[in-house]
Amino acid sequence: MKNFRVLFSVAIMLAFFAAPIWATAQINPKNLEKHIKYLSADRMKGRETGMKGSSKAADYVEKYFKKYKLSPKGEKGYRQNFIATVKRVKVDNPERKSDNIIGFLDNSADYTIVIGAHYDHLGTGHIGGSRDSLGVGKIHNGADDNASGVAGLLELARHYATNDIKEPFNMLFIGFGAEELGLLGSKHFTENPTIPLNSIQWMLNMDMIGRYNPDNGLAVIGYGTSSAFPKIFEGITSTIKFNKSKDGNGGSDQTSFYKKNIPVLFFHTGGHDDYHKPTDDADKIDYKAMEAILKLEIDVLDNSMKQPKMDFQWTN
């Protein structure tokens, strides 16, 4: 009995100390909420490209990449600088400085999966893009567009950096700048890649994943960009409804990769009445649905790492 008690005590202690390691590898809705509330707060002034709010958002992404011990993979540390030009409307300072923030999870593999989300938004609407003519001059906080995607990016980075598993693929995490000005950050990266484009297995993009509507479901766009995706999705289920669409082109930053013959998937919960308006706020985000979306993405990512080098297919 004494020996049993000792063994039982040891087992309990091992379980206790092992639990936090497992817990760190799970999607945490509280982390999602923390990230979104920070990025979409009024003090960020709508994260307009070239302004302080956007710079603070870039700093925030870099801080967490460092925290998760991702290797810097920009041209200057984690940063890839570029100039973004405002073209939709006439402004006094059309040439804006921006950055892609790039962190690398090096698993000593031949191929790499890219995971991305843009961190910029519309500021106060003066750079164009606002859908509320009376709202120009008011802060467009962009909680769904795209603080939600950045929160997902950071949680996936945390998951894969802390799960104590050496995956058979490397992972490149990118916070893109200047998406709202015409996908400029992702375009700059694909024209000036910091890893060989032919080493990229596929690219996962998150843009507006915070306003899940069960009537419409989650859109998974780009399913037709590789013949491997049907096999990757085999056996995958979710607590949320998701609809697969073949087209890889249009709508967000995955387009820049698609145009370079790289398979893509774009996760998106769809439009809503607050899209590109000052009312896109953090209190309207469905954090539990976001958790389910990210768990679905992990299933897709993990299944994709069981595949050899994926082929590419044009869809339009």
Image (cartoon, helix red, strand yellow):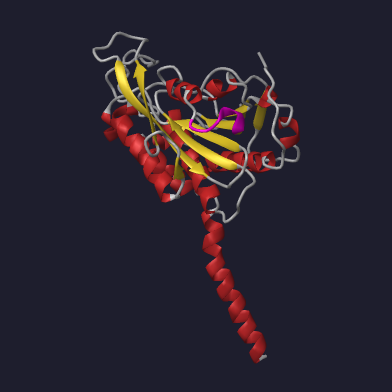
- Looking at the rendered image, the quarter that the N terminus falls into is bottom right
Q: Residue furthest left?
A: 92
Q: Position of residue 107 (x, y in %)?
A: 58, 47
Q: Position of residue 263 (x, y in %)?
A: 64, 27
Is residue 301 visible in this depiction of the protein?
Answer: yes
Q: Position of residue 304 (x, y in %)?
A: 68, 38
Question: At x 51% / y 55%, what residue is drawn?
Answer: 24
Q: Residue furthest top?
A: 90
Which of these two is toward me, 22 or 59? 59
Is residue 140 visible in this depiction of the protein?
Answer: no
Residue range (magenta): 194-199
| 305, above or below 205, in the image | below
- Looking at the rendered image, the quarter that the C terminus falls into is top right
Which of these two is toward me, 135 or 311? 311
Dividing the picture into quadrants, the one containing residue 142 is top left
Q: Position of residue 265 (x, y in %)?
A: 61, 29
Question: At x 52% / y 50%, what residue is drawn?
Answer: 161
Which of these two is toward me, 235 or 102? 102
Dividing the picture into quadrants, the one containing residue 136 is top left
Which of these two is toward me, 277 or 235? 235
Dividing the picture into quadrants, the one containing residue 221 is top right
| 247, above or below 154, in the image | above
Is residue 174 rendered to the left or right of residue 120? right
Is residue 72 rendered to the left or right of residue 220? left
Question: At x 75% / y 37%, what residue is drawn?
Answer: 234
Is residue 65 rendered to the left or right of residue 124? right
Q: How many marks?
A: 0
Q: Is residue 193 magenta?
A: no
